[in-house]
Amino acid sequence: MKPTILISNDDGIESQGIIRLAKEIKKFATVIVAAPHTQQSAVGHSITMSNPIRMSKIFYNKEFFGYAVEGTPADAVKLAVHNLLKEKKIDLLISGINQGANTAINIIYSGTVSAAAEGTILGIPSIAVSLASYIYKNFDAAAEVASKIAKAVLKYGLPTGTLLNVNVPPVPKSKIRGIVITKQGKSYWNDVYEKRIDPNNREYYWLTGYMVKTDKGLEYDVSAVEKNYVSVTPIHYDLTDYKTYEKMKSWKLKL
């Protein structure tokens, strides 16, 4: 029996990444697509609470493709699991293929990773897949990588609460040097808010900046992708700092 795989993303249901991913995964699995109706990059793990969430069916070339959800990536996953597919067992969730890297500090902001994290919270083994460029548009290698890792997760499973964050270098398959298991990098963004003036002479600000790269070894996601390796990072949503937790027991805090 074919596995059932739920596909979502944060770039929106009309993005080329999700279309290419669905095509590849359909080669060995039953695919259900539920993704945001519009671009939702960098919304993190936000959910919609004060507005209605609408959903519509999307067709490409007169064939049903999936469900467009007027909400965040986490909304799309929640709605799919709790309503659209509540009678069906979902064997795996794949979020992507995202346009742009989700490495180092980007993981915190990423809607792509958050869709996968939501799947993990709901007890579904989950993978987030990103193509590490906003310009490079060939998703073929990333789709093949996603397929290989999906099959591995279906075979070996993942620990409860853990998802895989996959970043693929923006090069043809022939130039990818391999797949490495990595840690989340320590690189960070130096944010710059550029002040501008609109036609009505009012001030507004546009976020720009650059990444400060501190990671050198192949063990870190940023560095691995730069060296044309696929980076696979196991991450989890338990944010507890256990070392500090143990140290703080000696503080003897009292009211």
Image (spheres, rainbow, N blue to C red):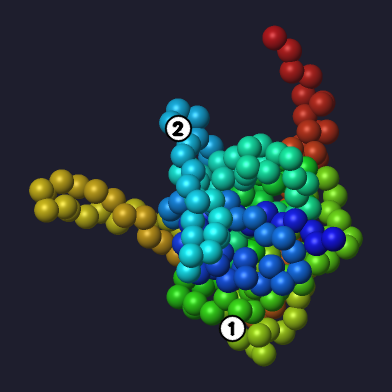
Residue 153 visible? The answer is no
Q: Assess whether mark 2 and mark 1 are in contact (beta carbons under 8 angstroms).
A: no
Residue 93, x across and y down, in percent: 70, 54
Between 97 and 235, the residue placed more toward the observer is: 97
Which label sits in the foreground, 1 or 2? Answer: 2
| Residue that extends furthest to the top in the rendered view of this protein | 255
The type of residue carrying mark 2 is Pro
Question: Where, quadrant-wise, is the C terminus in this rendering?
Answer: top right
| Residue that extends furthest to the front in the rendered view of this protein | 62
Mark earlier in primary sequence (1, 2): 2
The type of residue carrying mark 1 is Val
At a point 25% along the width and 53% down the height, the residue shown is 195
Q: Label 1, label 2: how many angstroms apart (C-alpha)?
A: 41 Å
The secondary structure type at the circle numbered 2 is: loop
**Residue assigned mark 2:** 52
Between 150 and 162, the residue placed more toward the observer is: 150
**Residue assigned mark 1:** 171
Mark 2, residues whose alpha carbon is within 10 Å: few (<14), some, or many (≥20)?
few
Q: Quadrant of residue 66?
A: bottom right
Residue 139 visible? The answer is yes
The secondary structure type at the circle numbered 1 is: loop
Residue 158, x across and y down, in percent: 84, 54
